[in-house]
Amino acid sequence: MGSKDVKLLNFWVSPFGKRVEWALKLKGVEYEYIEEDICNKSNLLLELNPVHKKVPVLVHGNKAIAESFVILEYIDETWKQYPLMPHDPYERAHARFWATSAQQKLGKEGSWTALVKSGEEKEKALNTASEVLDKLEEEIKGKKFFGGDNIGYLDIALGWISYIIPIWEEVGSIQIIDRLKLPAINEWMTNFLNHPVVKDSLPPRDKALDYYHLSVKKHTPN
Amino acid sequence: MASSSDNEEVRVLGKWASPFSNRIDLALKLKGVPYNYSEEDLANKSLDLLKYNPVHKKVPVLVHNGNSIAESLVILEYIDEVWNNNNNHAFLPQDPYHRALARFWCKTLDDKILPAIWNACWSDEKGREKAVEEALEALKILQDELKDKKFFGGETIGLVDIAANFIGYWVSILQEIAGLELLTIEKFPKLYKWSQEYINHPVIKEGLPPRDELFAFFKASAKK
C-alpha cells in the first residue's frame, strides 16, 4: 500500500491534524499530505467532510474519516503495528475520557477562554485549566509517558498541550501551566517534544505565534 | 438478586430525566447486565458523585470492579467492550471503517445535532427562527445518514441508535412543549419511522422514562 492510498487533509497549525500526523508516523504509514486553506475551503474538503467542513480528514482508499479522535482509533484498528490504545477496557475508557475532557476543559473552556476573555471570565477559565492540570499531574506521576515507557493514544491526544499552550501563554502574556507546581507535566512535555516523531513535526513557532495573535484578536470582544 | 462478589457489581449514578444518563440504562439492558441505580440530585451532589467524577461532577457515571467511568459515549464503548461474548448484543460492528462512522455520528449527535434541537426548543422569540432552521438542518443530516436502514446500526440497535435516544424520544416531548414542529412524519418520514421502531423496540421501550412524567418535568422547567 503506497502513499497514494492514504491522504491527510490538514491545516498547518491545527493541533487536531497534528495528532493524526503523529499517529501515522508512529505506525510508519506513508501518506500524502494535503494542505487545506481553512479560510477558503476547497471543494475536496466540502465533499469529504460535508457535515462539519473541517480538517483533519483522513482518506484511506475510497473512505473518508473525520474527527481527530475517531481518526486515531481508525488508524489504530487498521494498522496493527505500534498499538496506540491500551488493551484493557478500563484503561481504554480512561484514555478516551481524558482525551476529550482535556480538550474541552483544559483547551476550550480553560486556556482558549482565558486567552480571549478578561476579568472574571478570564479568572474562571484559568481556574478551570488549573484544576484539569492538577489531575493530569497525578495521572502522569511515575510514568515517562501516559502510555507508559512509550507514547500511546493519550500522549498523542494530549500532545497539543506541550506546544500549543506555551504559544498561547506567550500570545496572551498569561501563565496556564505553573511548571514548578506541575513538575511531572513539565517533564512529560519535555519528553514528548523530544520524541523523534514529534520533534521535527511542529509548525514553525514564529508563524504559529503570528497566527494565534491574529486569531485571538478576531475572537476577543471589543 | 445478590451479586457473586462486590467486584462484579455494576452501579450507575444517573438522573432519570437525562438522555445522557438514559443511554447507559438502555445499553446495560440491551446487554442483559443487572445493575444498581442511584438517582442523583444535581442541586445537591452526593459524595459518591464527587468521588467518582471529580473532573466534571456530572452524571452518568458507571462504577464497575471498583473503577468509575464518566462521559456517556465513553461508558457506552466500555460496556460494549466488557460484555462482548456471542450472547451479548454488539453495539459496534467489527470493521474499522464502520466503527469510525458510528463514532463520528455519535460525536456529531453530541456536538452538533442535540445542541441545535435543544436550542430551538428553548429559544426565545428573537433567536427562534434561526435556531429552528439549524435544528431542521441537523435533523436532515441525520436522516441522510439513516437512509433506508431500519436502525442506524442496520437490522439491530447500534451505538448510534443508543446515542440518538434524545432524537427518538425526547424531541417529541420537547417540541410539543415548545410548540414547534421539528421531527414530524411530513418533514422527516424516514427519521420519524425510525423513531417509532426505536421506542417500540422491546428492550428500549422498557428502558425509557415514562412519557407523562418526562413531559411534566420539562414543562415545569419551561415555566422557570
Image (spheres, rainbow, N blue to C red):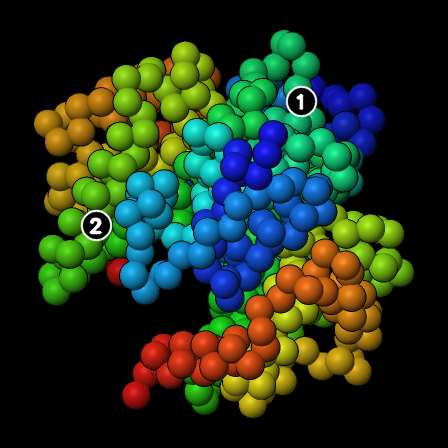
* Chain letter belonging to callout 2: B
Q: Is residue A82 left or right of residue A202?
A: right
Q: Which residue is located at x 47 percent, y 38 percent? A: A59
Tell me the element at label 2: helix
Q: In the rendered structure, are the residues bearing label 2 and label 1 in contact, judged by CB atoms less than 8 Å apart?
A: no
Give A200 or B83, whichever is nearer the viewer. Answer: A200
Tell me the element at label 1: loop
Compared with B132, A103 (above or below) is: below
Q: Where is residue A105 shown, x and y percent of the image?
A: 55, 64
Q: Which residue is located at x 31 percent, y 41 percent? A: A47
Give A143 or B114, whichever is nearer the viewer. Answer: A143
Outermost right residue: A142
Q: Earlier in the sequence, mark 2 or mark 1?
A: 1
The residue that label 2 is drawn on is B134
Location of residue B47 by image quarter: bottom right
The residue that label 1 is drawn on is B83
Q: Where is residue A30 shown, x and y percent of the image?
A: 62, 42
Give A103 or B76, whichever is nearer the viewer. Answer: A103
Residue A120 visible in the displayed image = yes
Which mark is in front, 2 or 1?
2
| Gap in angstroms between the C-alphas marked 2 and 1 | 37 Å
Give the class, few, some or many, for how many residues have Cα within 10 Å of label 1's Cα (few <14, many ≥20): some
Residue B177 visible in the displayed image = no
Return the mark for residue B222: none
Q: Is residue B146 left or right of residue B40?
A: left
Name which residue type carries label 1: Trp
Q: Which residue is located at x 50 percent, y 63 percent? A: A12
Compared with B78, A207 (above or below) is: below
